[in-house]
Amino acid sequence: MGVDYYNILKVNHSARDDDLKKAYKRLAMIWHPDKNPSARRDEAEAKFKRISEAYDVLSDPQKRQIYDLYGEEGLKSGKIPNSSYEASSSSSRPPHFYHQHPPNAASFRFNPRDAEDIYAEIFGSEAGGASAGHRTFRDASFRNAGGANGELRKAPAVENPLPCSLEDLCKGVKKKMRLSRNVFDASGKMRVVEEILPIEIKPGWKKGTKLTFPKKGNEEPGIIPADIIFVVEEKPHPLYKRDGNDLLVNQEITLLEALTGKTLDLTTLDGRSLMIPLTDIINPEHEIVVPNEGMPISKEPGKKGNLRLKLNVSYPSKLTAEQKSELKRVLDGVS
């Protein structure tokens, strides 16, 4: 019975030109050798050639008519029976039927078209052909896509900022990012789809941390889609500033508080109330280190950096004579 071209393209025997073209596009986008890794290249090349041959035969009225009447053997051998009543090798008809030979059947010679020429014709026509402004896919991508070693070229990665608050980076959070991208549908046509990419921010991630979604870029013929990369950016915080794994806080206190003490009440990034007693006399630009109250260390679960509290002493702008006298009395003899 020979090769069943209809089955190769997954179309029925009444398929029209549009049906054949859609089927070819869908399969060619899957099996073109340049769209497959080296390990599958031989298999892809063989299937791509069969797909191309099936389309070549079924899209050509004369080839298709001869194939329908005499099957693959009659098509390729050129041996057209002389009798008008004989058995048919095509699976598309009953065992015996009456027919007339197609016009010019006796002089017909099977001359298959090059698979790449068919590909360039089908896809190149949608890209504007090979005019100065638009090259065919064959020239623009597939023949040159892989370079000398034949490997498929990958589009450059696309980076996008991922703004995160310090609270996000301290506690961790799940985000959803909406992505619009160009993809080929089953018929081979380009369309825009929207995807939701789930992102889990891990506690302790720093500015510059990258999260990669492989091959989520736009699809293009002959090119592996780009990776989409999200790069963490830290939003400014009104109180805290990050320094590696440590958190910095600038806190102003009065001269009286510096001398007599005070309890500071800070709200941490994870929402706790942190009480810090000041019992010693505070010098200007004094720094207090609170262990294990900084940012989580992402590579060391359970560990945190430190909270570094820089205290700025605010001096009074003026004092009355009475106040000065009282200070002298109180501080007299204090070194």
Image (spheres, rainbow, N blue to C red):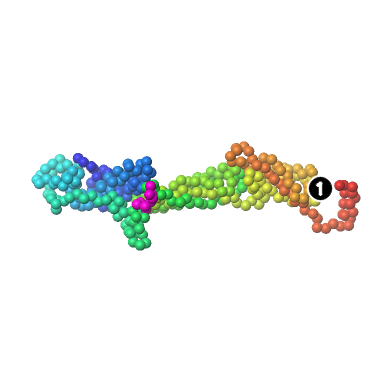
Camera-side residue of 152 and 182: 152
Q: Residue furthest front?
A: 148
Asked whether residue 196 appears in the rendered view, the answer is no
Locate residue 291, reporting x and y percent.
Answer: 69, 40
Residue 183 vertical placement versus 202 (above, below)? below
Where is mark 1, residue-wise?
Answer: 259
Write the start and end of the magenta stretch as one range.
141-149
Q: Secondary structure at mark 1?
A: helix
Q: Quadrant of residue 98?
A: top left
Instruction: Locate the N terminus by quadrant.
Output: top left
Q: Residue furthest bottom?
A: 132
Q: Is residue 325 left or right of residue 33?
A: right
Q: Is residue 243 left or right of residue 157?
A: right
Locate residue 2, reporting x and y percent.
Answer: 21, 41
Q: Which residue corresponds to the image point at 19% horizontal and 52% vertical from the top-left?
A: 62
Q: Quadrant of residue 37?
A: top left
Asked whether residue 150 appears in the rendered view, the answer is yes
Locate residue 229, reporting x and y percent.
Answer: 50, 48
Q: Which residue corresponds to the image point at 59% horizontal and 46% vertical from the top-left?
A: 206
Q: Which residue corresponds to the image point at 73% horizontal and 46% vertical from the top-left?
A: 287
| Amino acid type at mark 1 | Leu
Camera-side residue of 221 and 10: 221
> For residue 142: magenta?
yes
Q: Is residue 15 left or right of residue 323?
A: left
> For residue 298: magenta?
no
Locate residue 277, reporting x and y percent.
Answer: 75, 43
Residue density around tag 1, few if under 14, some if 14–19, many if 20 or more, within 10 Å? some
Q: How many marks?
A: 1
Q: Which residue corresponds to the image point at 52% horizontal and 49% vertical from the top-left?
A: 230
Q: Mostly what secondary structure, the magenta segment? A: loop
Camera-side residue of 316 and 289: 289
